[in-house]
Image (cartoon, helix red, strand yellow):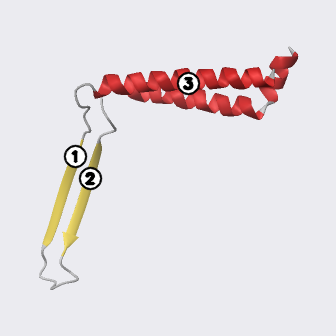
Amino acid sequence: TAVEAAWSRSVQAKGAEGLVELAVARQAAASSLWAGAPSIELSQRGDKLLDDAGRRESEIGFTWPLLLPGQGSARQTAADAERQLADATALAAKLRVA
């Protein structure tokens, strides 16, 4: 119980906890079907600075990042390895505190 109490108050515990939380978040992101979040872009341009002829351009863009073949499994493998590293780092820090 003394080791657990010391571990719960140590700086290493907070750092290790942060690494594990980051690894869990990356695992969740790696399990996504898309490479990133979709976005909409809106843009307008006019000629007021040049000759003020009243010309205007409007653009609407939509992006939806897709994963390349094999990229999803590679991201998942990397996230799993990062999670194992975070768990091992936390265990090593706990043993140092002990």
- On residue 94, the disc is none
Residue labelled with disc 3: 85
Give percent across and percent down for residue 39: 30, 45
Residue beneath the point at 26% across and 25% down = 70
Q: Give the SS element for disc 1.
A: strand
Give the percent coordinates (x, y) of residue 36: 33, 37
**Looking at the image, residue 18 lies above or below residue 87:** below
Q: Which amino acid does label 2 sit on?
A: Glu
What residue is drawn where x is 81% and y is 29%?
9
Query: Who's the residue at 30% across and 31% down the image?
Result: 34
Q: Is mark 2 on a helix, strand or loop?
A: strand
Frontmost residue, 72 versus 43: 72
Residue corresponding to mark 1: 62
Residue depth check, mark 3 versus mark 1: number of the one nearer the observer: 3
Residue at the spot x=62%, y=32% of the render?
18
Q: Quadrant of the C terminus?
A: top right
The 10 Å Cα crowd at callout 2, few under 14, some 14 to 19, many 20 or more, is: few
Q: Which amino acid does label 3 sit on?
A: Leu
Please say if the residues under marks 2 and 1 sit with CB atoms less than 8 Å apart. yes
Mark in front: 2 vs 3: 3
- Report the Cα–Cα distance between label 2 and label 1: 6 Å
- The residue under label 2 is 41
In the displayed structure, 76 sits above or below 64; it is above
Of residue 29 and residue 68, the one placed in the foreground of this image is 68
Looking at the rendered structure, the secondary structure element under dot 3 is: helix
Tell me which label, 3 or 1, sits earlier in the chain. 1
**Quarter where residue 16 is shown:** top right
Residue 69 in percent (x, y) is at: 22, 26
